[in-house]
Amino acid sequence: MVSTTTSAIKQTINGQVNNINVTLSAITSFKVLSADDSLYYMEVTYKGVNMKMDLPTGQVSFDSQKKDSTDVMSSILGGIVDKPFTATFTKSGRVHSVENLENMISSVLDGFRQVQGTQKEQIKARFMQSFGSRSVKGNLEMSTAVLPETPVAKNDKWSKHTILQSTMNANVETVYQLINVTPTSYLIHGEGTIVTIPGEPGTSPMKYDMKGTMVSDIKVDKATGWITESKTRQNINGTMTIKDNPDTPGGITFPVSMTGETIITDR
């Protein structure tokens, strides 16, 4: 699964507009270890990860292929490449479980002796937010949980509920439709709504109150059921609140808009 997600974030804080652009690309390999009547047991391995961020303060980038010991974040990304973890999928593409990922990340971080103490904990928290089991489960499911639970015919529709878990958590309700069938593929169109989930008190320094829409177009291989092409577009608007803390006494709430696109191919 070759995926590229681009996000454009616009924040207006105290009348000043801040634009943030993020591109995250990953190559992920899946190997079926076994299967039964309802589940596929997969070995999952990152083959490459890179991230680029255009911030108001400048551009930063990290790449698992970069060989530079002074670039700690790129080196850690390189450390998780070719380190397998396991995931269990249902026949309809839902992710039943993700295992061994936290242990893998912890062992990779333990290998970087130059990262210790508070810095290590901060980096670990950041990685768990993007690459921990909950986040990976949610991100994988957003890509794979598109198939119906029961047989459908052309033009039939079905609904799916998934949970997006990253810097913000959100409920995603999507209606999919089988719009065409070719000799080799099923073509699926999806339209959905996104509504953020309030965080538990004290669990995060930030609170999101946002909603938006999502549109997907997906091509599924007839023989294997694997997604060969997918394009998903998101548009989300609302407010973000930074809670009271020493850096932001009294807290602050400001408007935020996000547009994003994820493109997936199988090569």
Image: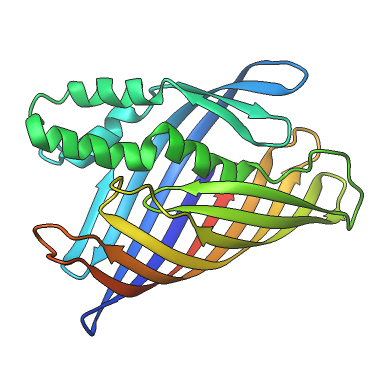
Residue 215 image point, x, y percent: 64, 64
Residue 95 image point, x, y percent: 59, 33
Give the residue at the far bottom of this rendering. Answer: 15
Residue under the image location 85 percent in, 38 percent down: 150
Q: Report the side of 246 relative to 3 (left or right).
A: left
Residue under the image location 28 percent in, 71 percent down: 253
Give the residue at the far right of this rendering. Answer: 153
The quarter of the picture where residue 120 lies is top left
Residue 160 image point, x, y percent: 70, 49
Q: Quadrant of the C terminus?
A: top right
Residue under the image location 87 percent in, 46 percent down: 183
Q: Is residue 265 visible?
A: no
Q: In the displayed structure, would residue 35 be above or below residue 24? A: above
Q: In the displayed structure, would residue 24 be above or below residue 76? A: below
So how many labels did they put on this image? 0
Q: Report the side of 108 relative to 5 (left or right).
A: left
Q: Nearer the viewer, residue 7 or 158?
A: 158
Q: In the displayed structure, would residue 63 be above or below residue 15? A: above
Q: Report the side of 131 relative to 248 (left or right).
A: right
Residue 223 image point, x, y percent: 80, 34
* Colour pattern of the rendering: rainbow
Q: Quadrant of the N terminus?
A: top right
Residue under the image location 65 percent in, 59 percent down: 216
Q: Is residue 58 visible?
A: yes
